[in-house]
Amino acid sequence: MIADIQKEILRLKKEKDFCILAHCYQTPDILEIADFTGDSFALSTKAMIVPNKNVLMCGVRFMAETVKIFSPEKTVYLSKSDAGCPMAEQLDTEMLSQLKEYYPDHAVVAYVNTTAELKTLCDVCVTSSSAVKIIKKMPEDKILFIPDCNLGDFVQKQVPEKTIVTVHGGCPTHAKLTAAEVKKAKAAHPEAEFLVHPECVPEVVALADYAGSTTGIMDYAAKSEAKSFIIGTENSIVQHLQLAHPDKMFYPLSKDCVCHNMKLTTLVDVLNVLKGTEGEEILMDEEMRLKAKHCMDRMLELGQ
């Protein structure tokens, strides 16, 4: 049954000129029919270079918005309208405008996990893998970092020469992981290396053998000579790594580290988008798109 649905998706994808992007938190049956898989920003850059006129994002809303920001000529769809991101939605433009008034001499740095609307008020955008490099290269010494205080703290420790102000926000899925869980997992698997996403609280990140983006974690596990790993990020990564490296062992830090927004999309949802019965087209005012693109262009410039 799954194979039949996948076969029909592949047929319709070709017939209707679709490129399918799937964030690596999606399930394996979706990753198998995607043209590209990976982190959100990397997927948006892939959409820029493909010839397809239609792009389907299997992920959450801010990811589809990022695709539209960079590829306005393409018709961009989000697989599931309800798939949002609690972190991206924690701030609105009114709140950010007030913060900018309170910190008038600070450059505003936005984690890519923000809405397009918020990006219009920011100076530079960053990913979890590029944040340290970009903030080091910025000429400004004072930074207002939104919306993830945990990633902001991680960057501050790497770039002590800058003054970084954070706001109370972040990913609820990663933020609920605790140091006590790390110690318990290490006691159960003392030989395992602990790999963690910097969206986790500082006490958890401090116990890691490696801290980095989702792709960074997967690359580290692939190249490491270690044979077992405790994974401190969304649990789908445990499954993907286990399938990719059956000779190694991967353990979730917590059985509850699940992003329910990412899990909203199913293989049948993908099929129905291609049939034209489901999904949401991402529409964006051109003025807002250009304003949001400014901080992302700055990211590309500083990230080179």
Image (cartoon, helix red, strand yellow):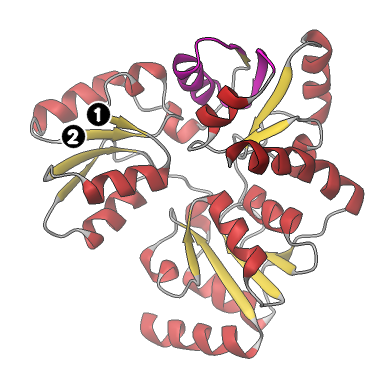
- Residue at 72%, 23% (x, y): give it: 108
Q: Amino acid at mark 2?
A: Glu
Q: Nearer the viewer, residue 126 or 19?
A: 126
Q: Position of residue 254 (x, y in %)?
A: 29, 36
Q: Image quadrant for the C terminus?
A: top right
Q: In screen coordinates, is 28 left or right of 139?
A: left
Asked which secondary structure carries label 2, the reply is strand
Q: Is residue 1 visible?
A: no
Q: Nearer the viewer, residue 188 or 290?
A: 290
Extreme right residue here? 287
C-beta proximity under 8 Å, tags 2 and 1: yes
303 w.r.t. 148: above or below: below
Residue underneath mark 1? 209
Q: Position of residue 275 (x, y in %)?
A: 64, 83
Query: Residue 193, which numbered label?
Result: 2
Range of residues picked out in magenta: 140-164
Query: Residue 171, which numbered label?
Result: none
Q: Position of residue 296 (x, y in %)?
A: 70, 42
- Residue at 80%, 68% (x, y): give it: 73
- Residue at 19%, 44% (x, y): give it: 224
